Structure formats: C-alpha cells, structure tokens
Image (spheres, grey):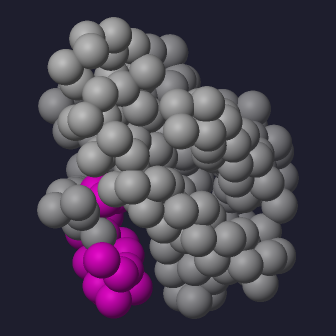
Amino acid sequence: MADRAKILLVDDREENLIALEAILSSLDLVPVRARSGEEALKALLSTEFALILLDVRMPGMDGFETAAHIKRRERTRNIPIIFLTVVDSAPDYAFRGYAAGAVDYLTKPFDPWVLRAKVSVFAELYNMNRRMTEQAALLRERLTSELPGEAAEQASVLPELSRRLTAVEDELARVRELARKSNDPTLSVPLTDLSDRITHLRSGFDALS
C-alpha cells in the first residue's frame, strides 16, 4: 500500500507543531498541520486521517468544540482523537476530553516515547483497517460471482487472498503485542473491533474455499 497514514496535528502555536513533528519524525507517516479548529475541520473535508492530535487551549474554537464538530460528522466521527494540554489545566479537562470523544488525554510536557508509541499503534490499526477493507471488497466480489466462466479465475485468486489475509492476521498479533507492552487500555476497543472484522473475513474466506 503506497499511501502512508496521515496524522492531523492541531495547535495554534508554531513551536508546538514543530515539536510534535520532531517527535513523530521517525515514524512512517505524514503529519499535517492545522493552526486552529477551523483549519482542522477544513482539512478533514478533503483528507483521510488515521489520528488527530488536538490541543485543548486554542483561541476561538477550542479543542472541545473542535472535537464536537468532528464527532458530529459522519465522515470523521470514527477518527481517534488524542487531546494535548498543559499540566496545570482545569481539573475537569480530562473528563471533558473523554466526554467529547477523545480516546486519550496527555498533559504537556509529555514523554515523547509515550506519544510516539501511541501514535504508532493507532497508525498501524488504521493501515490494517484499510487492508481489511480492500480484502473484504475482493472477497465479496468473489462470493457474489455466479458466472461459470469465472471459476478458474476465482481459483487462481484464492491462494493470493489467503496469503494476504494471513499477513493481516500476523500483523494483528504484532500490534496486540505492541499494545500489551505499552499497557494502554485505550487500545482495547479498536483492537477488539479489528479482530472481529478479521474473524468474519476469515469465516467468509473459509466458506469460499
């Protein structure tokens, strides 16, 4: 898959955006900047993102309001959001962040390794979901094909599809291990959802075989 996962970085301070890009520079992803909530919503109209790193304190539309708009849109409601804010923020900020739909909440200054590890796993999950969608579309095409002349073609495609599915299953095991080592409970739900999708796809493949 040629396209790298894109991460939306939302912060009104240039130095914070530079710092985030530096922390994530070792990962195989594309960071995209937004200097305000309005810029973030505009970027989300035309680009697909694996994750959003969203600053809470911004002039005008703050992080909570921006997240509310994101979660109201059908196209963007399922994009994971990690809120970032300074350590002396109001005590209810964490609660408000999770209530707004965030999957996690980190206070500044945060451990670069922790942020990099979290972003890495979410990017992996995003890439795996894209591969799952591609494989599921191919499988549906084969399952619904009823033309006798396509039997030979279908038989030739099955080994390749099986190889790809096995690779996805192996990658899921690797991501599960990364999540286990990071001891991050926020990854439980997306990992379970992806595992269920892989199980259903494997069942469909077995029926086709």
Whether residue 173 is situated above or below residue 122 in the rendered picture: below
Residue 76 placed where, x, y %?
42, 28
What is the count of numbered marks?
0
Q: Tell which of 67 and 30 is nearer to you.
A: 30
Horizontally, residue 77 falls left or right of residue 127, namely: right
Residue 31 placed where, x, y %?
26, 65
Q: Tell which of 110 and 121 is nearer to you.
A: 121
Residue drawn at x 41%, y 32% is 139
Specify whether residue 12 is in view. no
Residue drawn at x 54%, y 45% is 80
Residue 70 placed where, x, y %?
45, 27
Horizontally, residue 195 falls left or right of residue 146, namely: right
Location of the N terminus (image quadrant): bottom left
Residue drawn at x 75%, y 32% is 99
Q: Quadrant of residue 151?
A: top left
Residue drawn at x 27%, y 15% is 148
Magenta residue check for 79: no
Q: Quadrant of residue 157?
A: top left
Whether residue 152 is situated above or below residue 175 in the rendered picture: above
Q: Tell which of 162 and 114 is nearer to you.
A: 162
Q: Quadrant of residue 73?
A: top left
Specify whether residue 120 is in view. yes
Q: Tell which of 207 and 179 is nearer to you.
A: 207
Residues in magenta, as a range: 5-28
